[in-house]
Amino acid sequence: MFSEVAEGTFDVLDTGKRRTAADVLAIEGEKNSTMLAAMVRTVWLYRNRADLNWSGGAAAVTNHQIVQTLDEHPKLRDFLGVGEQIATATGMIKSAAGAASYLVEQAKGDPRLLFRRVMFNMARKHVGQALRRRDTREHLALYLKAFNAWHTGEPLPQLRFTPRESMPRIATTR
């Protein structure tokens, strides 16, 4: 057991080689620590070096900065799966896709991303939960609600549709 050790010591303590950000996050108990570390690094670089080169030594992000940034942006974890899904569908780098989705949602609450997340959650079976029946009317209504919010610029804090609701009409003006 060590105490009163310099902050940077943990990065190499007991391994003999420098720990990666993914190593540090894994020690902290994070799942999918490699992709999460890459996403956190992307968010840090976007917030701190948006217009500068993101490769090479000048773009290094310390493990302390990674942990601190994840503490400031805990919802980033929720975008691991989104990043993988976007990457699979588009060929985009997984960590860039997850970070981009997170940043856009934080900035605007993009209704298209909300729609996407709702649809993925509806299609995914969670532990102890029966798979939801696919309902064409519900899917169309959710899509139209998300589209209308995006098209008009209106905020859409939640995306829901109940069978008793009227079918949304397509917004045609901004």
Image (cartoon, rainbow, N blue to C red):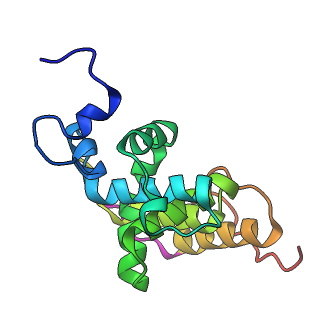
From this view, report whether residue 33 is shown above or below residue 147. Answer: above
User: What residue range appears in magenta?
Assistant: 130-136
The quadrant of the rendering that contains the N terminus is top left
> Compared to 94, does 126 lie above or below?
above
Instruction: List the single residue furthest toward the right.
Output: 173
Q: Residue at x 66, y 73 (%)?
A: 144
Quadrant that contains the C terminus: bottom right
Pinpoint residue 7: horizontal percent, then vertical percent: 34, 29
91 vs 153, left or right, is: left
Q: Position of residue 20 (x, y in %)?
A: 26, 51
121 sits left or right of 30 in the view: right
Residue visible at 20% across and 39% down?
27
Give residue 57's quadrant in the image.
Answer: bottom left
Please, is residue 21 above or below residue 150 in the view?
above
129 left or right of 135 in image? left
Residue 43: image location, x then y, percent: 52, 55
What's the magenta bit mostly, secondary-structure-wise? loop
At horizontal 22% and vertical 15% (from top left) the residue drawn is 3
Could you say which is closer to the camera, residue 6 or residue 23?
Answer: 6
Residue lying at 39% horizontally and 84% vertically, measured from the top left = 91
Q: Nearer the viewer, residue 1 or 129?
A: 1
Is residue 13 on the magenta stretch? no
One can see residue 48 in this view: yes
Residue 98 sits in quarter: bottom left
Image coordinates for residue 153, horizontal then vertical, percent: 80, 64
Q: Who is closer to the viewer here, 8 or 131?
A: 8
